[in-house]
Amino acid sequence: MVRLNSPEELEKFRQEIVSKKDTNKPCISICAGTGCLASGASEVIAAFKAEIKKQGLKTDVDTKGTGCPGFCERGPVVVIYPEEICYLGVTSEDVPEIISQTIKEKKVVDRLLYVDPTTGEKAIHEYDISFYKNQERNVICNNIKIDPKNIDDYLAIGGYSALAKAFSRMTDEEVLSEVKKSNLRGRGGGGFPTGRKWEGSRNAPEKIKYVIVNADEGDPGAFMDRGLLEGNPHSILEGLIIGAYAIGSHEGYIYVRQEYPLAVENITLAIKQADEYGLLGKNILGSGFDFKVIVHQGAGAFVCGESTALMTALEGRVGEPRPKYIHSNISGLWNKPTVLNNVETWANVPLIINKGADWFNKFGTEGSKGTKIFSLVGKITNTGLVEVPMGITLKDIIYKIGGGIPGGKKFKAVQTGGPSGGCIPEELLDLEVDFDELTKAGSMMGSGGMIVMDEDTCMVDVARYFIHFLTDESCGKCLPCREGLRQMDKILTNITKGKGKEGNIELLEELSKTAIEASLCALGKTAPNPFLSTLRYFRDEYEAHIREKRCPALSCKELISYYIDPDKCRACMICLKKCPAGAIDGGKNKIHVVDQEKCTKCGTCFEVCPSRFGAVKKISGEPVPSPIPEEERIMIRKSKEK
Amino acid sequence: MSEIHLQIDGKKVEAKEGMTVLEAAQSADIFIPTLCHHEKLEPFGACRICTVEVEVRGRTKLVVSCVYPVEENLVVRTRSEKIDRIRKTLLELMLAHAPDSEQLQDLAGEYGADKDRFEKEASFCIHCGLCVRYCAEVKKKNAVGFVDRGIRKEISFIPEIASKECNSCKECFSLCPTSYLQAAFVLTEALAFPRASSQTALKK
């Protein structure tokens, strides 16, 4: 077994790995991230292996299950090296053709390429695809190049060279000052300057100090940290060791949700491999520095993403936040100085050490340097993970990278920052995304969730959804959060059901104020954001619900009715047959009518009515026209007259 | 321990390092309302009723006095329009659960809280955690604990421990600001260890 006793030995070993690799040898990389696995990537990987064997190419071609490159919408994603041909939506049926065409004949399989929806042009390489082209992929770019289960792959692309550099050419103080100079801010949501946090712990007099990776990613729709932990676990580990070295910590924790089994598996394996190579444990790379890492699986509480709740949970107690009038970096885990950073923050550290703070400062805005990974989800054409420089406009993320809103629908709002973030409307699409601008707009960076909503989304219902989520996920300890949210949830639910009253908005505002001012932790202090931001930009929707009992987005079930326009109905029987409630009266050649008493408002009739007829309508805030008299319902078809 | 000088409601107060603002106020006979605080227990900071304004280096912020440590030259205000508004809303939220609690009613009078402001949800418990913490920290028995989280969080006696420990103790009963605890215990007793409860009845 290899044990690396110095930075020089690491470098020599790296050269050996690289020299053993034939760069001309074809390698088929298949994304084995959670998104692609859900789309059938493991069958594709198996099919490649079987086909290669069948065609007798076992020694000529490598296959590799890699980390997530981000384009989840079009998975499974396959990249073939050395040409870097990128195929999307690959199934096991495509495999024989890829082997015989691309691997053997060096021909591109056209139908598996990305087609630009506007120009119709096909893109052969990742970097030609608009989704990737407009990103700045500093952190996530290595995911597709490596097998996250193989440390040698990480070493081959320069892995642990930042650690070697820190040990051999920098003092711990210099490491800290480089991170400070980089202006890196915490990627978990708060945006606190990382270097300052580290410095506080470093200067604290206590001998025992801890470092923690916060991988308790719990925002609905967010999977940035998951993508990194699953796809490139060593980069996080390397950052963590460097951080520990800078502050003088010898014990680190990775707090990861148990709902991320693949992330747990990959990071646990990564720790084992690093330990065997002497990159963890005693006397790392002969530097005299000792450091060990323990993986701790969270039991599924959203609030444990809050730093003090996370530490309480790590101590083996119920994960409830504690007041932090003394910062965690001075008195954190077991009352010792503790640096807790998010997964993505740690993953940025090796880059800063390797390439320097000046390089890092080239990206981003005045107050927010570097790049940020977002998970772009919701009503968006290209769902996936995107890494962009701070300061990019929302418009560029949604349209240039995300490909806009599918189905010809109109953009309405984008929700950033997770459940305690806010909704940003169309008129602010030119907003330059960074920590401060998002806060100014009433939202926040959060850990990087970005949920796109189209015109069919009711903003009152969005607020209700997130507030309801938080009533479940509040720890229940402090009153303004637990009871304030309980009442807010009730009021918002009433509004979406048409039971809103005058004064409800003001009451919600007061409850919001109290929660912001008096809650114990950040969860409570930010919990009213979904309400406040939707009220700020979509007040008319609240008023329509309360005063006119009307849902302008035609989404709130209890405020809408389905109605069949007798002039447009062609009595085709489709909706009548599909209605699960038997609420449609009609027949062949007899105009259909919705029985409002029986209708459950499931929307099936609306969806199935052929678009050339468009006879089914949603109505809100006005009475449903009374059904036409029975005798007028019989249709005389022109075709029959002939 | 060094003396720390601070100002509470315009009054000069001397405190010892490590004291909380609440302790400093109490030592100077300045009243700050509390519900989840108990001198024998670790500060909890849950009910937030003891929220005060502090001025540190020219910046004003809201903190809970039962947790916030004193510091030199700290300026504290225990009443202001903002503090009163917060306390009023907090009381109204609690009164939705325990409208008949005398302690809450007294405070409601002081802060003008309307007990009917919010829809009633008669759970009686206001989650101050006094019983839970007293049993754990002082009695070291853990016979009563919190279960679940968020709006479903409630206190619950653990029958196996409660059946052995509670009858001879019951010290937590008097701590409860809403008199709910005793009812919860009687219910647990009746449901979980009926024999024990009938024996108690016989003894009486």
Image (spheres, rainbow, N blue to C red):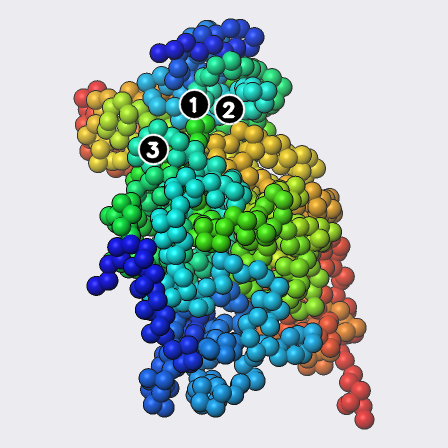
- The residue under label 3 is which amino acid type? Lys
Q: Which mark is residue B63?
A: 2
The quarter holding residue A15 reads bottom left
Crowdedness of circle 1 by 10 Å Cα count: few (<14), some, many (20+)? many
Q: Are marks 3 and 2 on the same chain?
A: no
* Percent coordinates x, y for residue A535 in the rendering: 68, 43
Contact, mark 2 vs mark 1 (Cβ under 8 Å): yes
Give A363 or A479, whichever is nearer the viewer: A363
**Residue depicted at x 73% and y 77%:** A612
Give A584 or A174, whichever is nearer the viewer: A174
Element type at mark 1: loop
* Mark 3 or mark 2, whichever is nearer to me: 3
Crowdedness of circle 3 by 10 Å Cα count: few (<14), some, many (20+)? some
Contact, mark 3 vs mark 2 (Cβ under 8 Å): no
Residue holding disc 1: B67
Crowdedness of circle 2 by 10 Å Cα count: few (<14), some, many (20+)? many
* Percent coordinates x, y for residue A43 in the rendering: 39, 77
**Residue depicted at x 34% and y 57%:** A267
Residue holding disc 3: A336
Q: Which mark is residue A406?
A: none
Q: Are marks 2 and 1 on the same chain?
A: yes
**Residue depicted at x 60% and y 32%:** A513
* Percent coordinates x, y for residue A405 in the rendering: 66, 64
Relative horizontal placement of residue A338, taking residue A623 as reference (left or right): left
**Relative to residue A372, is residue B111 depicted above or below?**
above
Q: Are marks 1 and 3 on the same chain?
A: no
* Percent coordinates x, y for residue A8 in the rendering: 32, 57
Q: Tell me the distance, in whole angstroms, between the alpha carbons under discs 2 and 1.
A: 8 Å
- The residue under label 2 is which amino acid type? Val
